[in-house]
Amino acid sequence: MVHPAEEINAVLAMILALVCLAVAVIFFFYLKWEFSSYVKTIDLIPGPPKIPFFGNALSIPLDPCGGLQKISVEWPKTYGHFRRGWFGFKAYIDISCPLVIEEILSSQKFIDKGKDYDMLMPWLGEGLLTSTGNKWRKRRRLLTPAFHFQILDNFFDTFNKSANILCQQLQRSLSVAAELNKTDAEIEVFPYLKRCTLDIICEAAMGVQIKAQLEDTEYIYAVQKYSAILFEYFTSVWSFLPKWMYFMTKHGKEYQKCLKIIHDFTSKVIQERKKEIDQEVATRQVNTEQEDTDEYNFKSKKRRAFLDLMLIAAKEGAELTDEDIRNEVDTFMFEGHDTTACAAVWFLYCMGTHPKCQELVREELNEVFGDSDRPCNLEDASKLKYLESCIKETLRLYPSVPHIKRYNSEDIFLSNGYKIPAGASYSIHIYSLHRNEEIFPDPLSFKPERFYSDQCSERHPFAFVPFSAGPRNCIGQRFALYEEKVIFSTLLRRFRFTYNTAKHGLAKPCADMLLKPHHEMPLIITPLCQ
C-alpha cells in the first residue's frame, strides 16, 4: 500500500517535471527566435538593450507623455535617428532621418500601412488611409481631382460659416463668465475646436449640416466617443492583446455601439444623396449632353461634397460600391476631424505663449482685411504668408500625426547600410524628425521664420513632413491648410489668446495616433472690441 505522503510527493515531482519541461520548451523556442536571421538583422540596428521576453517594454513609461518623451526624444539622442526597439516579440524600427525617410516615402513600392491600423478597419474599411496596392492606386487617382484648388475654393463659405459660429460660441462662454464676475476666466478651447472641425468636415464630406457647435445628436456623440475610445485603446495594454478580448470589455462594446451609429448615419446619407442626384439628372435631361458633362464631372465648379463626387463617379462607371463610398466618406471624417482640431489647439497654444508672433499675425491680417469684417476668401488666404509660417512652425513642433507606421512584405535594403527584413514594422517618426537639432537648430523654440522661403530652400525636402510625403501623402493637406487659415484668421481678428504658463506650466503633448494635449488647454480669451 502506497503511503499518502508518497503519493503527494510523486504528484509534486510530476508537476515539477512538467514545469521544467515547459520552461525548457519555452526557452528552446525563445532561443530559436532570438538567433533567427530576422531578429539578428533587426538587432544590427542601434537601439536600447532589451530584456528577454519583454524587449524594451519595461523601460517605457505607461503614461502617454512619458512614452512619447522616451521613444521620440531620449532614444533619438542616445541611439540616433535610425533605431530599433522591441515591445515583447514585436520589433519597431523608428526613423527620423530625412535621407532615409525620403528613400522610403518616395517609393512607389513600400506603401503598405502598419498592422497598428487594423483597429481602424472596422470603421474605415479599405478606404484611402488603410488600403494598399492597386486598390489604393486606383482610388487615389479617382479622388485626387476632388481636392483641386478650384473645387476647394467653393468650401470657403463652409469654413467661414463654421468659424463664425465658433467665435459666437466662445463669446457666449465669455459672457457667462462675465455674469459670474470671473475676471481673466479661462476657457478650455479643445472641445470647441473639435466641434467646429466636425461641422466643416461633415458638410464637406457628406453635404450635411449636423450643427455640432449648436446642438447634440446621437451621431455627434458617437463620433466623439469613438475617437476617444480609439485613443484610449492605442495608449493601453489592450493594443497588444487579441482584439476579440478587447471587444468583450465595456469599452469594446461601446466601441461597437458607436461604430454602428456612425455607419448607419453614413449609409443613410449615401442613400438619400443617391436619390437626390438621380432626381437632378432626371430634371436636366432637357439640357445638352455637354452641359450634363460639365455639371457632373470632377471639374465642375459647382460646390459638391466629396460624397457627391464619388456618387457621380460611380454613375459614370467608376468601380465604387456603396460600401467603398462609405469607407471613403468615413476616412475623410476620421482624417479631417480630430487631426485639424489638434493642429488648431496647438496653434492657439503657440499664439498664447508667443504674444509677439500673435501680434505680427494680427498686423498681417490688418494689412489684408483692414477694418473690414468680411469673410476670408482664397485670394486672402494666399496672402497670409506669416500666418502660414506660424501654422507650419506649429506643425513642426506639434505634428497632428506624430508618426506614420508602415509594414513591409519583403526586405528593404537602405542606403545607410541597414536592412529592414520582411515582416517588420517601421515608423516614420515625424515628431522626432521635426525636433532634430541637426536640421532645426534650437528645435524647441517657436520660430516661424524657419519657414520663410530663403530658409526652406536650404533645407532637405523631407525634413518637414507633417502631412507625410511621396505617393501616400495626405490627399487633403491643401484643404486642411485653407481651413486652418480661415479659422485662425477669423479668431485672431476678434480675440487675443493668452496661456498662463506660470499657472499651468508648459503644455505636455501625448501621442499615439494623434498628438494631443495631455491635459486640457485653458486659454484666456480677450475680445479685441469691447
Image (cartoon, rainbow, N blue to C red):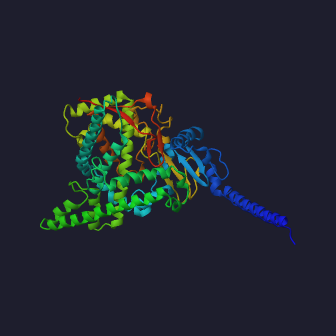
- Count the labels in the image: 0
Is residue 152 toward the left or the right of residue 115 in the image? left
**Residue 417 visible to the viewer:** no
Judge by depth and name the residue closer to the eye, 85 or 174.
Answer: 174
Is residue 519 toward the left or the right of residue 381 in the image? right
Q: Residue furthest left?
A: 286
Q: Residue 476 location in percent, x, y? A: 34, 50
Q: Residue furthest right?
A: 1
Q: Residue 334 location in percent, x, y? A: 38, 53
In this picture, is 507 found above or below 5? above
Judge by depth and name the residue closer to the eye, 31 or 383.
Answer: 31
Q: Residue 179 location in percent, x, y? A: 28, 33
Residue 124, image quadrant: bottom left
In this picture, is 264 found above or below 56? below
Is residue 18 toward the left or the right of residue 468 in the image? right
Q: Quadrant of the C terminus?
A: top left
**Residue 504 visible to the viewer:** yes
Q: Quadrant of the N terminus?
A: bottom right
The residue shown at (53%, 51%) is 426
